[in-house]
Image: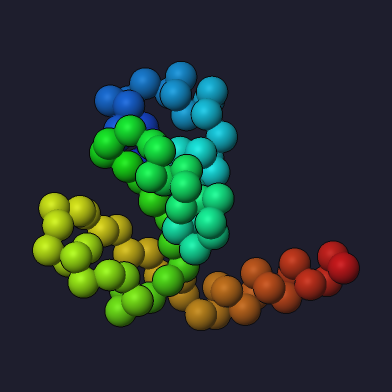
Amino acid sequence: MLEILSLIRSDGDPRWCRSVPNWDRGPWLETLLGYRRARGNARPRIISSHLPVQLFPKAFFGSKAKVIYTVRDPKDVLVSLFHFARIF
């Protein structure tokens, strides 16, 4: 999803996506470093988060921000975890 949003933001030009790491393009809001990077990024910002929407500030819902909410199938998560855990 981050790659798609990055391409949309750069009008389909992949040079920005190839030259800037994904943690700089869409930093994680939950970490202090990610929060600082997000505040420093040019608008429109791409921000990643695992937080439930209920924990976002109330001012967020009154803003013009757009949200893309991605949910994985629980079975897919368990199968992925199983194969990842087998490696270790």
Instruction: Confirm whether residue 1 shows in the render.
Output: no
Depth check: give the residue in front, 84 or 46: 46
Residue at image location 46% in from the left, 19% down from the top = 15
Q: Quadrant of residue 75?
A: bottom right
Locate the C terminus by quadrant: bottom right
Depth check: give the residue in front, 37 or 14: 37
Q: Position of residue 10 (x, y in %)?
A: 32, 27
Residue at image location 68% in from the left, 73% down from the top = 81
Answer with left or right where residue 9 lies relative to residue 87.
left
For residue 19, above or below residue 4: above
Residue at image location 35% in from the left, 76% down from the top = 55
Q: Position of residue 45 (x, y in %)?
A: 32, 42
Instruction: Confirm whether residue 44 shows in the render.
Output: yes
User: In the rendered picture of this protein, how many numbered marks are placed on residues?
Assistant: 0
Answer with left or right where residue 25 lies relative to residue 7.
right
For residue 61, above or below residue 64: below
Q: Position of residue 32 (x, y in %)?
A: 53, 56
Here the colouring is: rainbow
Q: Position of residue 48 (x, y in %)?
A: 43, 55
For residue 51, above or below residue 12: below
Answer with left or right where residue 88 lies relative to residue 69.
right
Depth check: give the residue in front, 63 or 79: 63
Residue at image location 27% in from the left, 70% down from the top = 57
